[in-house]
Amino acid sequence: MGKLFLIRHAFTPANNASYNNQRGLWKIALDKDMPIEMEYGVNQALELGEFLNDFKGKILIYRSPYYRVKQTLDYALTKMNGDYEIKVLDDLYEFNSGVHYAHTISEVLEMYPESKRYFEDAKKDLESAIYTGGESRNMVRDRVKDVAKRFEEDILKNDYDYIFVFSHGMVNRYIYYWLVGENLQNDMKNCEVLSVSDRKSLFIPKTFVPKGFMVDIDKYIGNNKCYTKKVDRY
């Protein structure tokens, strides 16, 4: 029986809104177009590729349509030697955090005062609280149920030795929930590899983003694809 691994994309500038409380990151790109970070994100993806290169056999790769996931896979593939079947799966899109995306808490409250309702609701029931202009965690959980079922069927078919799912932290969390029947104990880190069959993390990159790191926003605005090494695999 094939084994399935859930993989989160590399670090992005938008992640710094919560990691280092940096304001203005929403100016870089929309959620679907946000790139990975030029130094730490790229190095994480390269480390990921070196780890995944140890897996040999018939391998199917699913990826989210979002740009940061494509970039993560592109960089990883530069370190991987194998014959991979790659499919873009639109249903793997990240949860819709509405006006909260790439904003610090103070920033979103200043720019969108109506978002106060979300934070009040989240204190009562985090899973049901709906992001302003977006969706709740429960809504994400429910919409990925069919995706998880598809992966379960792929595993049972035994057509592949391994299945890699390149996606997002929240989406992976609930895919894991439907496949395993329990919640993840911790949020997935950038480029973490989680084995569903073994119910454990297999890889976390050594490259980490230091506290206090600030993204140079101007390097990304209007030019966020210039540094990407193209890999014409699909």
Image: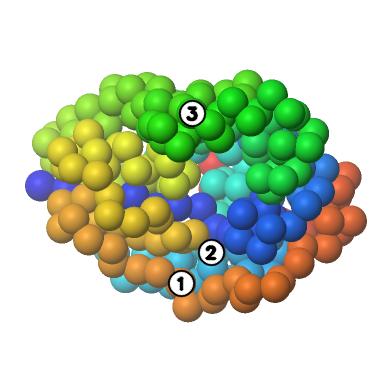
Label 3 to label 1: alpha-carbon separation: 35 Å
User: Relative to residue 88, is residue 197 depicted above or below?
Assistant: below
Q: Nearer the viewer, residue 59 or 45?
A: 45
Label 2 to label 3: alpha-carbon separation: 36 Å
Q: Position of residue 40 (x, y in %)?
A: 63, 69
Q: Mark 3 or mark 1: which is in front?
A: 3
Q: Which residue is mark 2?
A: 45
Q: Position of residue 89 (x, y in %)?
A: 44, 31
Any part of residue 105 in sight: yes
Q: Earlier in the sequence, mark 2 or mark 1?
A: 2
Q: Earlier in the sequence, mark 3 or mark 1?
A: 3
- Who's the residue at 69% across and 24% down the image? 114
Q: Amino acid at mark 1?
A: Pro
- Who's the residue at 22% across and 61% down the image? 200
Q: Point out the image quarter for the C terminus.
A: top right
User: Relative to residue 46, is residue 155 depicted above or below?
Assistant: above
In this rendering, position of residue 192 left or right of residue 134 = left
Q: Which residue is mark 3?
A: 121
Q: Which residue is mark 1?
A: 205
